[in-house]
Image (tube, grey):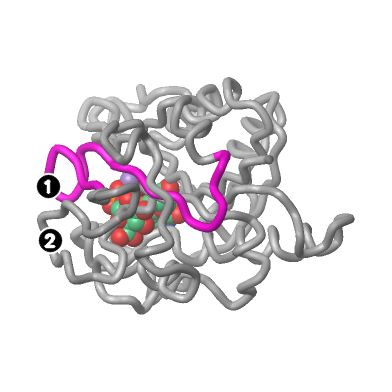
Amino acid sequence: PTIFVITPTYARLVQKAELTRLSQTFLHVPQLHWIVVEDSPHKTPLVTDLLVKSGLTYTHLHMPTAKDRKLQEGDPSWLKPRGVEQRNEGLRWLREDRRAQPGGDNQQGVVYFADDDNTYSLQIFEEMRSTQRVSVWPVGLVGGMKYERPVVEGGKVVRFHTGWRPSRPFPMDMAGFAVSLKLVLANPEACFDGEAPMGFLESSFLQGLVTMDELEPKADNSSKVLVWHTRTEKPKMKREEALQAQGLGSDPAVEV
Ligand code: UGA
Ligand code: MN
């Protein structure tokens, strides 16, 4: 089955670096369709060009985050959920596009939400490819812990190893689960709730789709970390700004 990877992305200094790393990981994954959704009122030339040259099968979409939902400069990053409208736009496209294909709602496929800054082992894609409904696995370096993971007993997920509000319906990071395309198509209303309280974004999507008992643990009964919630440091531009003030800034025609 094809893996449909939905990636929200937004313009910032490290965007091209993030998307370059991600696209070159995906090049090693067979049968992957990348759905890139820019948080922008239009498709940008940087992302357009990167996708054209990527060698990947992709769909390029855009959906700006509503102004009152968008993080402002200086806001702590946890204040508002990120990537919500973009993931929902990716789901909207996927449902519409797949319906139009032969087979309609009854199609093999797996849907995964891959943020542009995480680190993905190739192995995680082979693990998720056999997803029947919703598969789950550990995520490294997340939630202020070495890893969070579903705890598996007798082949079933019985609880979650997490340091924060374990009572959440699905206390997992976005990178820790994949959903079958059939389930996504069979539940056309399932989407991410931008109004969900902090930490409940993943639950807002999964709640209507699956129960804990039905989760399919991957990565050796959720004992292996195959994806990491890495975050990229914001580059300092002190020297750049100083040089710019003297008219000696870097050439704006050079894309970074
Ligand atoms: C954590 C989770 O790993 C995310 O999946 C979740 O969306 C987020 O928290 C949340 O609570 O909303 P974190 O590393 O803090 O992630 O978030 P980012 O990586 O900064 O953003 C998640 C995705 O949204 C990225 O792909 C990013 O490019 C995109 N994004 C971020 C936008 O599209 N617009 C923005 O303004 C910010
Ligand atoms: Mn991130």
Residue 134: in magenta span = yes
Q: Are marks 2 and 1 in contact (CB under 8 Å)?
A: yes
Instruction: Give me the residue at 69% from left, 58% from top.
Output: 94
- The amino acid beneath tag 1 is Gly
Instruction: Give me the residue at 35% from left, 31% from top.
Output: 226
Res. 139 image quadrant = top left
- Measured as percent of width and height from the top left, residue 248 is found at 35, 22
Disc 1 target residue: 144
Instruction: Give me the residue at 76% from left, 64% from top.
Output: 105
The circle on residue 164 is 2
Local crowd at mark 2 within 10 Å, few (<14), some, or many (≥20)?
Answer: few
- The amino acid beneath tag 2 is Trp
Q: Nearer the viewer, residue 75 or 128?
A: 128
Secondary structure at badge 1 equals loop
Residue 66: in magenta span = no
Q: Classify 144 as above or below 196.
A: above
- Tag nearer the camera, 2 or 1: 2
The circle on residue 204 is none
Q: Nearer the viewer, residue 88 or 161?
A: 161
On the rendered structure, is 154 left or right of 204?
Answer: left
Res. 147 image quadrant = top left
Q: Which residues are magenta?
A: 129-149
